[in-house]
Image: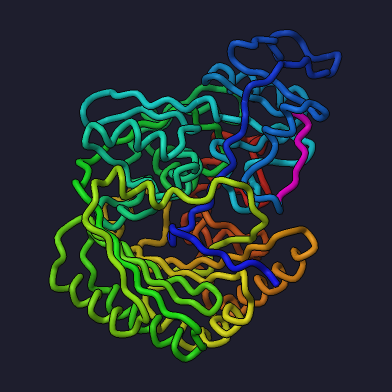
Amino acid sequence: MAKKIHRKDFLKLAVLANLSLYAKPFEFLVKEKQTADKNPASLSNVTYYKKGDVEYEKLRQGFNKRIDKYPAVIALCQNSSGVAEAINYAIANHLPVAVKSGGHCMEGFSCNNNGMVINLSLLNKVEWIDNDTIKVGPGCTLSNLYDTILPKGKILPGGSCGGVGIGGLVLGGGYGLLARKFGLACDSLIEVTMIDGTGKLRSSAEDKELLWACRGGGNGNFAVITEMKFKVHKAPATLQSFRFKSHKIKTDRAKNILQKWFELSAILPPGCFSAYVLNGKTVYILLTNVDKNTPEVLAFIKGMSALADKTTQTKAQPLTTALKVFYGQKDPLFFKNSSAGLYKNFADIEHCIDAAIGTVIATPGMIYQVNTLGGNIQNAEAEAAAAFPHRSCIYFSELQTYWQNEKMQSHFLERFQYVQNIFINNGINTQYVNYPDINFKNWETQYYGSNYSRLQFIKNKYDPNDLIRHDQSIKKS
């Protein structure tokens, strides 16, 4: 039987292993016709690694032990010049490029087989431009970002799992405990610098359409982002959390709690985040609040407490301390996680949720979770300025499965797909690109809605030869 997963952080945003990056360089064999200017051997800008090196093994691995890919070469870049060199290297050697900032992609799109992986983990600095503006490297992890800006009383609404790289998070949208108060992470993005698919340095300061695309549609699609500028916000002083736990759940009770949670969470103020988590036969409800407990918050607490077997709460803690509780697992795991639909209300899933809940309860190691969106994510100005297409949905769901060894994988993948099919066959087809599923058949519109063709125009402009790509990257028109 699978080991039951117990988690302190109910907001699951996938984390990565902290990989050792100290390694020796090697010379990659290139075609004889390639000239020196196409492949400058500059170790100060980029170092290349190949199969057979111990360092290569460390660098190719990510947090998900289910994903096992072998690129021909890994380019560990120090700066934008190094990325440009790596792109030209890939062009000369006909290598498709995958981009890795934090390496947390749930389907391993930040790695590839027989191509090049551009590793941005060394582009991880945070620089202050002024009191309200920072410049960040895409390889900077959330924990490092928070350690830098929180002491100055500033915050970026970037999520909760400490090991996630800021690059991939923001380029797909980016949400977390503070998104309802401050908007998506991509809404705070004000400029990007990148190397496009031809090796040219580009800036969104020269193309507003490029910034639009990178706010929710930029994950490994048409360029390698090397610098990101953000506006930062005044950080809330404290965060308080409440947890409501119910044991030995059956389908009817789990559904009733979910329905009540939808009702009460819909009126929560923007300073609150909440999640419904069905983990086997246990239901957890999480509520966090960075503002005062309004009548709506008190009504939520009263309503959930009446349905739960146990209610616990923390004191209002300094934000720096409170966020660390949600930083999450660091050791690699076998798992399959993905989006399971974005919803407007309980009615979207009422007709099919019994079958999904019943399967999760009967499958130890499987988790079904629904998180609150809404609040200031639903901002008309932000919607017009970003490629992220799903602001009308005020809930985001995810399906998770965990197992202990490879022998168990086929069973959990079959159970996972069974539940996904329940939702898909009942019209749940809006999905969040940062939680991809390789089995989504109409992923273009599921991830990007009506914005897909507009993103294709950006692809044609900045990566005309489709150098930067993965299994679900934006295709040329």
Q: How is the image coloured?
A: rainbow
In this view, the residue in front, 106 or 217, is 106
**SS majority, magenta:** loop
In this view, the residue in front, 108 or 294, is 294
Which residue is painted at 66% across and 18% down in the image?
47
Which residue is painted at 45% across and 41% down in the image?
214
Total number of numbered labels?
0
Reply yes or no: does residue 70 show up in magenta.
yes
Q: Quadrant of residue 84?
A: top right
Q: Is residue 8 above or below residue 25?
A: below
Q: Measuring from the top left, give residue 322's x and y in whole percent.
A: 31, 50
Q: Which residues are magenta?
A: 67-73
- Compared across the picture, whether 370 is left or right of 465 comes to left
Q: Measuring from the top left, give residue 33's x and y in whole percent.
A: 83, 14
Reply yes or no: does residue 336 show up in magenta.
no
Q: Quadrant of residue 286?
A: bottom left
Which residue is painted at 35% across and 39% down in the image?
189
Q: Residue furthest bottom?
A: 252
Q: Quadrant of residue 359?
A: bottom right
Q: Measuring from the top left, give residue 141's x and y in whole percent.
A: 46, 37
